[in-house]
Amino acid sequence: MAAEPDTSWIPNYHFTLATKDRALHRSRCSTFWIQASLFNPYSLQDWAILNVPGVFVLLAAKLAFDQPRSLAGKLSRLLLLPVGSVLAYLIFTSYDFSGGVADQGAINFVAGCLGCAMVLKLYEFTALTSRPVYTPVRRTEKVQKDGDHSGDEKGRRESGAPATPGDVLHFLLDPRGVSYDFGAQIPRAPETRNVNSRSSFLLSTLYRAVFFFLMLDVSLVTFQSVPGTTVSTLAGGSLYNPDLPPLQRYLTSGLLVLCCGAAPYFGLSFFHYVITLLSVGIFRQDPAEHPFIFWSPHNATSVRELWGKRWHSLLRSAFVAMGYKPGSALVGEVGGLMGAFIVSGVLHDIGMWGYGKGTDPWRVVGFFWLQSVGIILEGIWRKIVGRRVQGVWGRLWTWTWVMCTVHIVAEAWLQRGVGGAVNFVPEDYRPAVYLQRYLASSISR
């Protein structure tokens, strides 16, 4: 009988984090010298390790500013790309960021997306062939009468002078390109806050931050309160309850996926407002540099308008660099659209892998690929009919297409228990839980 092969070298792919009466099983790749472990927010060493990929992104951005066309600069960025990508993979797959709390495990989903986003930005900066041009939303610097622009920040950044650490940091913290040439063509929602008064702008932003946090909690509580499903448990479950009549079954699944879509909308908006408060209130940035990241996505009258204009564009330039440009070079506009959405799908699928429950590219990447199909169908409609998709019928089409296809990706995530790992705030501090309890007690009287 043949001897059993030696498998001692194979890294341990599974570990368990016990939390009271339940355990969080996560599938992680603990390769090379880094072992899977809890991330300690009070450890300077852990923070130092976590920021290593960020250093590579900073260096790549610095080289993109100072040496966009030189051979040495291109080779240096080309070297940074694989090394930084491998380190991002090792670090973001070898730490558990939930603190061992099972029902907060979705933070590892976010960590996986963040690690992938860093790799995408590394690729974007590696592919740059020209220096990013600083184009402030409004010019507040005064130009000297003799024409000397040496004290003008805009003039300095455009002059080709070496980028300062502040220049690079400002560039990295502006992924939408609000103050740079690559973001000039990105549509932005009309500003309703008073950008000419810092105090008024901060108060309006604070109000929005509080409101969106409340709405985020309402969407989560609604999701967790739908009866007859196990999608809000760590074990996971299906959107579709076979015990319900067809109409009720699909109305229930529709409500669940609406909550799944509302959570990132309210959550990303909330964090954007918090960052805006810090940037404008403490670091004294121009309020005009912090427009809304969403533009009423529910009002979209086409799939193209939804994803190209009304949804957030935080990684749009990276999707263009890594997906649209290669795809369009191969098979034109159709290939570009599919390439950009496939890259977006890969990012979200890696997020689920970071959560520790494997990947599901057919459903996760497939959902995003289908969004490009929807846009292509709208292009065919315009060629046949002679006008673009718009108006009431366009809105009906958009809602129908997105609501039908989003079930695919939501089912993939919820079956893996992501819906049970989003309790980032203890119940005693959740405003929507208090509201729910108050309404329940008022009705029972």
Image (cartoon, rainbow, N blue to C red):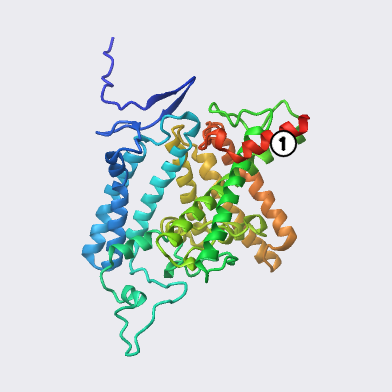
Viewer-proximal residue, 173 or 140? Answer: 140
Considering depth in this image, is 214 or 310 the residue closer to the camera? 214
Q: Position of residue 423 (x, y in %)?
A: 53, 35
244 w.r.t. 168: above or below: above
Q: Look at the picture and state if 154 lies above or below 395.
A: below
**Badge 1 element:** helix
| Residue 395 falls left or right of residue 376 | right
Whether residue 255 sits left or right of residue 23 in the image: it is: right
Q: Quadrant of residue 35?
A: top left
Amino acid type shown at disc 1? Leu
Quarter of the view holding residue 86: top left
Residue drawn at x 28%, y 52% is: 55
Report which residue position mark 1 lands on: 439
For mark 1, does the 10 Å Cα neighbourhood hold few (<14), some (14 to 19), or many (20 or more) residues? few
Q: In the image, what residue occupies the spot 31% across and 75% down?
A: 156
Residue lying farthest to the bottom in this orientation: 146
Image coordinates for residue 289, horizontal then vertical, percent: 47, 66
Tally of numbered tags: 1
421 relative to 305 in the view: left or right: left
Across and down, in percent, residue 109 comes to 46, 39
From the viewer's perspective, is residue 119 above or below residue 410? below
Q: Position of residue 1 (x, y in %)?
A: 28, 9
Q: Residue furthest left?
A: 72
Q: Is residue 315 visible?
A: no
Image quarter in which the C terminus is found: top right
Residue at x-position 26% and y-position 25%: 9
The answer to whether residue 335 is visible is: yes
Q: In terms of depth relative to the viewer, which is nearer, 369 or 48? A: 48
